[in-house]
Image (cartoon, rainbow, N blue to C red):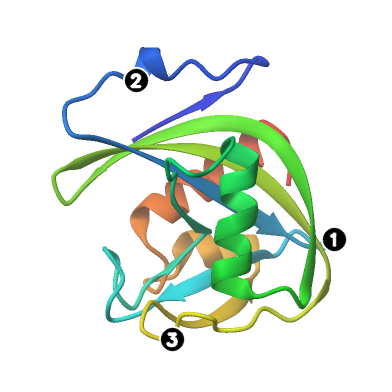
């Protein structure tokens, strides 16, 4: 697993892997440093039953990466939750189920509202985790633990 902080430019050519998938992730945190994670459902692509950051695949119809994460947030959490979304802050690579996933990372500051379960077969619920619990819980995926630690280290949130 790799996490690279962006220096203002996304260069996916640096991540030329066989069987590459491009995705977007938002790391949502609140004013207390708690992390909002989504519990993956039975029909999720991977990490079923475990908690992870909100995100998904970049689609050809997306105009840019920020539009993609906004679409994913609305599809997964509905429109009753307010998140202040950053520009891209990093690129994360992990290998899951024979796919080299390259994720564009965004930070999201929780403002108000409740996330809704919009895709019940893919999402079982949401939970705010204190940082220490997020990185030690058996309920959180190993890739999410890694990313949570890296984001805290690099972005202090």
Instruction: Give me the residue at 63% from left, 36% from top.
Output: 153
In the rendered image, residue 92, in percent from the top left (x then y), is placed at 44, 35
Q: Residue furthest front?
A: 61
Closer to the chain start, of discs 1 and 3, is 1
**Looking at the image, residue 113 lies above or below residue 145:** below
Q: Is residue 151 visible?
A: no
Do residues under tags 1 and 3 come within 8 Å of each other at their CB atoms?
no
Q: Residues within 10 Å of mark 1 (few under 14, many from 20)?
A: few
Location of mark 1 (residue): 31
Of tags 1 and 2, the one toward the viewer is 2
Q: Quadrant of the N terminus?
A: top left
Assign a secondary structure to mark 1.
Answer: loop
**Looking at the image, residue 13 lies above or below residue 50:** above
Q: CA distance from mark 3 to mark 2?
A: 33 Å
Count how many numbered circles sit on residues in the image: 3
Q: Is residue 72 left or right of residue 102?
A: right
Q: CA distance from mark 1 to mark 3?
A: 28 Å
In the rendered image, residue 32, in percent from the top left (x then y), is placed at 81, 63
Of tags 3 and 2, the one toward the viewer is 3
Assign a secondary structure to mark 2.
Answer: helix
Instruction: Give me the residue at 56% from left, 47% from top.
Output: 68
Location of mark 2 (residue): 15
Q: Which mark is residue 120?
A: 3
In the rendered image, residue 17, in percent from the top left (x then y), is placed at 23, 24
Q: CA distance from mark 1 to mark 2?
A: 33 Å
């Amino acid at each position: 697993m790799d996490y690279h902080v962006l220096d203002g430019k996304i260069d996916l050519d640096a991540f030329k892997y066989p069987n590459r998938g491009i995705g977007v992730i938002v790391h949502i945190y609140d004013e207390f440093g708690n992390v909002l994670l989504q519990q993956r459902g039975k029909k999720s692509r991977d990490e079923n039953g475990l908690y992870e950051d909100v995100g998904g695949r970049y689609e050809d119809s997306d105009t840019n990466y920020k539009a993609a994460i906004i679409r994913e947030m609305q599809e997964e959490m509905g429109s009753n939750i307010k998140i202040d979304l950053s520009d891209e802050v990093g690129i994360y690579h992990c290998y899951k189920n024979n796919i080299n996933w390259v994720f564009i990372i965004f930070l999201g500051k929780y403002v108000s509202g409740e996330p809704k379960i919009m895709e019940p077969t893919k999402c079982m619920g949401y939970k705010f985790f204190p940082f220490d619990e997020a990185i030690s819980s058996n309920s959180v995926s190993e890739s999410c633990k890694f990313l949570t630690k890296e984001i805290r280290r690099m972005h202090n949130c």
